[in-house]
Image (spheres, rainbow, N blue to C red):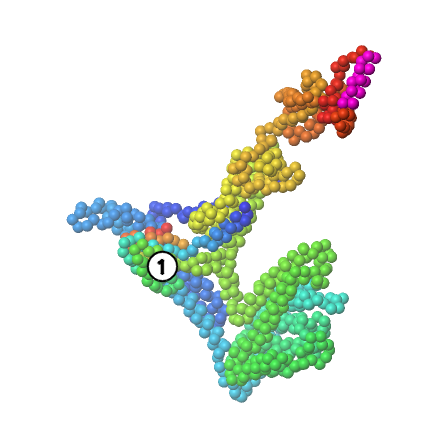
């Protein structure tokens, strides 16, 4: 039993969660996001349906509709209609 | 009972602590919709404003501390914290933002032209929400710019520190005779300055703070005494060279060397720290004196460390304790030259602190570092010429041979290089290299000795060969295995100590600030990033601790339920066992879940693993899983319980233990057989003691055929009535069979405990035999000898005639009487005889 538990623990440890935010584009068109991370501004293009992992240590995202959101690094963001739903 | 009550309360107190992480890990915070917390925006704005002011303040501080590496290192985390504050301020508005967005979506798009205009309140609300949305965007925008600013400033600080380091190292000063003349005059001035400062300070302290000074000094002496005597008492055998040992083992030498370097150095360091803290807290030190005093303590500790190291390694007066194979005179010379190098370096550093404290001209700093570097270079050159080497087995008292060529070349090159660097004008670099040679070299050598001794002590049986190990074994009665394990533990401990002391020591030496090291260590323990995976050592440790705690609580609960509740409720032992086992597994599973979630592993990712595993389970783990499930069924259905007498296939015995994979059965020969649970579930299992312990015994009885069967039956029933068998169902006798010579009966009776069947049978048989003898019931017919002879037909006829003749004569003498008694000797003789 203990051995089994140890195996489970080990497999669990290898499948540890990614500490980063993921952004998914649910729109039918590609969107371009402006991301500020570690003091650097960069552009991120997301094709329709694409998911990208960003923000290892928190970042600011400017959405296509002009909204700005701060992400602390563990959120799941979905983009619909140029606006964001943050979970 | 009171302890268990207390424990119960403790459990109740801990449970809520354990559960939240689980719940937290499983679902994100519910999206509550606050009615109108409009002040979140202003709060965020306030915190941003505050952060901006702090940043401006920090910028000023950074500008002021342009030349101060330690100050810059201190400021950097503060700046980084501001970037995080900005992000947090932005994140704090998210809830409101989500609410506004949701509400705007509910209101729908603005009616297009031509459509009927919307109601006034809706219009107003829409405008208000849009305004608030804009405000939140503005807050996030401002947080964004603040975070960019802070991050850039942090990067700038790093850049400044890098430049500062290279500037100090690679700054070139033209060295000429003028420099020395200037330095001489400045030095003389500084000498008088120093005299005046120190003298003035001392007179002041003597006149006005004599009690404080006395108190600080006497307390320091007390601490020193305590450290000295305590250290001697505790670590004495570790650090003293035992005079009784004639030829110490290599491991003993290594161990003594390592401990006699580290322990006294740490003690001296602690003493120096205590002295300085006391002087400081008694307000004896003046701001201009304090840095000089602290530097004096630091260089003294450093000097002590280097001299302890040379004494430990070279052991000039005790050749048998020497770690390296060098001659006596070589060891002495090496010790002195290394000490001289360390002293030059120490004086250089102390004077550096004096220069800073008194604000001396740069030329003086340059000159003293130049002299120190040249002195160290010259000593290195001199070391290259001493002749310390010995051939293996050569007498240490002999003259010695020169260094190997490579080593002496390296020494000479380094010495010349140092002098050349100093003379060309790269005094900073020369000073840095000289310090590295002395201090980093000493730390590295100590670490090397530590690692060597750790490795040596970790070898199997090594500790038992050392003097310390023998003493330990004598004192604590350790056997060989325990001593060996102690050796392994000691080896790991030494490695850990070496890393903990050595690595920070070297990093500090290279100009890293304690803050840097601290933050690295913190990061190492709280967050290690490998690609997109983040591992937290603290989290994993916390998970393990929680798991162990969960196990402990489960065991305790099991014991309590079993020993206190179920025993008193007179629950069947089998049920008790099942309940206990089930609780045990449930507790382990729960503790595992709690531990996993506390370790920061998302349980949802485990679902993925379980999905992947199910394929493997389908193929590879089929047997194990089937046994596991069978075990659970056994626990729930309980076809047999612990203590039952079962027969499974060819295995027969008592059930000793039912675990989830297999069941242990102990046969009557005391052999333990481990039967996989699936066999017990799928196959036929006989259980003698399933519902009750009733059992039937059969005793076959055979008597001579001349007996009366009814009489025999009666007798057997009478015997059974007197024996310890059940009256109900009553014993009965079956007349099984008869033949020409025997009557076969079987006595059948029931016993209350099938386990006692053997002894009851024995008793019954004895009683039956006694009774049959008493009643003179023969078990067999009377025996008669039968002698086979061989004869021809004529002889046979003759013999028959003789017998007939004899019979006729006998018939004439007496009237023949027919006896009913057993007669058929001729027929039955062969079989009974």
Query: In this rendering, would B170 be left or right of A68?
Result: right
Residue at the outermost right position: B813
The answer to whether B182 is drawn above or below residue A6 in the figure is: below
Q: Residue at x 50, y 62 (%)?
A: B519
Residue furthest out toward the bottom = B177
Is B702 rendered above or below residue B321? Answer: above
Query: Residue B603, image x and y in percent?
Result: 45, 49
Residue B252 image position (x, y, % from top left): 69, 65
Q: Residue at x 47, y 76 (%)?
A: B167
| Residue at the outermost front position | B794
**Is most of the magenta stretch helix, strand or loop?**
helix
Magenta stretch: includes residue B809: yes
Tell me the element at label 1: strand
* Residue at left offset 55%, top offset 87%: B181
Where residue B329 sits: x, y (%)?
70, 79
Quarter of the rendering containing residue B257 = bottom right
Q: Dot 1 surroundings within 10 Å: few (below 14), some, or many (20 or more)? A: many
The region drawn magenta spans: B797-813
Q: Is residue B322 magenta?
A: no
The residue at the point 58 percent across, 67 percent down is B502
Q: Which residue is mark 1?
A: A60
Pinpoint the chain carrying mark 1: A
Marker count (numbered): 1
Judge by depth and name the residue closer to the eye, B704 or B216.
B704
Q: Is residue B594 left or right of residue B815?
A: left
- Name the spot of residue B197 as percent of width and height, x first: 58, 75
Q: Which quadrant is home to the N terminus of chain B?
A: top right
**Closer to the camera, B51 or B338?**
B338
Q: State whether residue B385 is above or below residue B782.
A: below
**Is A63 positioned to the left or the right of B468 in the image?**
left
Q: Nearer the viewer, residue B276 or B562?
A: B562
Q: Is residue B720 visible?
A: no
């Amino acid at each position: 039993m203990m051995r089994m538990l140890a195996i489970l623990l080990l497999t669990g440890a290898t499948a540890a969660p990614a500490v980063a935010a993921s952004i998914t584009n649910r729109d039918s068109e590609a969107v371009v996001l402006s991301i500020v991370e570690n003091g650097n501004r960069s552009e991120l293009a997301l094709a329709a349906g694409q998911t990208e992992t960003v923000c290892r240590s928190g970042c600011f995202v400017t959405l296509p509709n002009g909204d700005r959101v701060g992400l602390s690094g563990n959120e799941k963001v979905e983009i619909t209609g140029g606006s964001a739903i943050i979970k | 009972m009171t302890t268990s009550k207390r424990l119960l309360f403790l459990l109740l107190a801990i449970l809520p602590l354990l559960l939240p992480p689980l719940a937290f890990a499983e679902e994100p915070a519910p999206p509550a919709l606050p009615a109108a917390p409009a002040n979140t925006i202003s709060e965020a704005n306030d915190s941003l404003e505050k952060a901006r002011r702090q940043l401006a303040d920090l910028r000023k501080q950074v500008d002021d501390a342009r030349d101060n590496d330690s100050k810059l290192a201190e400021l950097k985390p503060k700046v980084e914290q501001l970037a995080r504050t900005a992000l947090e301020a932005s994140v704090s508005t998210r809830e409101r933002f989500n609410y506004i967005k949701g509400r705007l979506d509910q209101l729908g798009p603005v009616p297009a032209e031509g459509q009927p205009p919307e109601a006034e309140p809706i219009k107003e609300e829409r405008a208000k929400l849009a305004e608030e949305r804009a405000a939140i965007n503005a807050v996030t925008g401002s947080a964004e710019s603040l975070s960019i600013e802070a991050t850039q400033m942090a990067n700038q600080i790093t850049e400044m520190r890098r430049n500062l380091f290279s500037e100090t190292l690679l700054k070139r000063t033209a060295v000429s005779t003028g420099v020395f003349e200037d330095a001489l005059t400045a030095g003389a001035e500084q000498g008088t300055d120093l005299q005046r400062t120190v003298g003035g300070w001392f007179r002041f302290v003597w006149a006005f703070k004599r009690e404080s000074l006395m108190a600080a000094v006497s307390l320091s002496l007390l601490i020193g005494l305590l450290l000295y005597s305590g250290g001697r008492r505790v670590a004495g055998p570790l650090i003293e060279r035992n005079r009784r040992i004639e030829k110490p083992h290599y491991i003993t030498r290594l161990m003594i060397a390592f401990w006699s370097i580290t322990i006294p150095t740490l003690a001296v360091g602690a003493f120096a720290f205590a002295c300085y803290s006391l002087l400081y807290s008694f307000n004896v030190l003046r701001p201009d004196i304090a840095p000089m005093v602290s530097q004096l303590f630091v260089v003294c500790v450093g000097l002590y460390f280097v001299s302890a190291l040379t004494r430990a390694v070279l052991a000039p007066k005790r050749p048998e304790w020497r770690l390296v194979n060098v001659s006596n005179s070589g060891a002495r010379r090496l010790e002195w030259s290394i000490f001289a190098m360390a002293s030059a370096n120490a004086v250089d550093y102390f004077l550096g602190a004096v220069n800073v404290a008194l604000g001396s001209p740069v030329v003086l700093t340059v000159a003293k570092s130049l002299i120190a570097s040249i002195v160290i270079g010259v000593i290195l050159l001199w070391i290259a010429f001493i002749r310390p080497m010995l051939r293996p087995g050569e007498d240490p008292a002999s003259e010695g041979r020169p260094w190997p060529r490579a080593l002496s070349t390296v020494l000479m090159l380094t010495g010349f290089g140092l002098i050349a660097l100093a003379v060309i004008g790269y005094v900073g670099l020369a000073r840095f290299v000289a310090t590295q040679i002395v201090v980093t070299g000493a730390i590295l050598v100590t670490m090397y000795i530590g690692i060597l001794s750790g490795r040596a002590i970790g070898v199997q049986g090594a500790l038992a060969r050392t003097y310390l190990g023998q003493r330990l074994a004598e004192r604590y009665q350790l056997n060989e295995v325990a001593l060996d394990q102690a050796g392994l533990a000691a080896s790991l401990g030494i490695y850990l100590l070496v890393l903990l002391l050595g690595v920070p020591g070297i990093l500090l030496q290279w100009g890293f600030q304690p803050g840097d090291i601290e933050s690295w260590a913190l990061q190492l323990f709280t967050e290690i990033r490998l690609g997109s995976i983040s591992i937290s050592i603290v989290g994993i440790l916390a998970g393990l601790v929680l798991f162990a705690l969960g196990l402990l609580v489960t065991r305790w609960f099991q014991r309590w339920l079993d020993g206190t509740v179920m025993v008193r409720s007179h629950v069947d032992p089998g049920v008790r066992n099942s309940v206990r086992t089930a609780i045990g597994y449930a507790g382990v599973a729960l503790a595992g879940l709690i531990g996993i979630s506390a370790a920061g592993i998302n349980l949802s990712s485990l679902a993925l693993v379980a999905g992947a595993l199910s394929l493997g389970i389908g193929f590879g783990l089929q047997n194990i899983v089937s046994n596991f499930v069978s075990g659970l069924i056994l626990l729930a259905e309980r076809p047999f319980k612990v203590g039952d007498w079962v027969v499974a296939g060819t295995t027969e015995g008592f059930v000793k233990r039912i675990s989830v994979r297999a069941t242990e059965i102990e046969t009557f020969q005391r052999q333990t057989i481990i039967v996989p649970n699936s066999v017990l579930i799928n196959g036929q299992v006989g259980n003698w003691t399933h519902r009750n312990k009733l059992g039937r015994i059969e005793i076959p009885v055979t008597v001579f055929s001349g007996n009366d069967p009814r009489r025999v039956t009666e007798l057997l029933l009478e015997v059974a009535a007197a024996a310890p068998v059940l009256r109900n169902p009553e014993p009965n006798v079956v007349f099984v069979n008869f033949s020409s010579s025997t009557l076969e009966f079987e006595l059948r009776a029931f016993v209350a405990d099938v386990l006692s069947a053997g002894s009851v049978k024995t008793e019954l048989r004895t009683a039956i035999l006694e009774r049959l003898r008493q009643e003179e019931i023969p078990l067999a017919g009377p025996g008669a000898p039968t002698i086979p002879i061989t004869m021809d037909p004529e002889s046979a006829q003759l013999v028959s005639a003789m017998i007939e003749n004899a019979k006729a004569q006998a018939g004439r003498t007496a009237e023949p009487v027919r006896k009913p008694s057993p007669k058929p000797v001729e027929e039955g003789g062969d079989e009974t005889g």
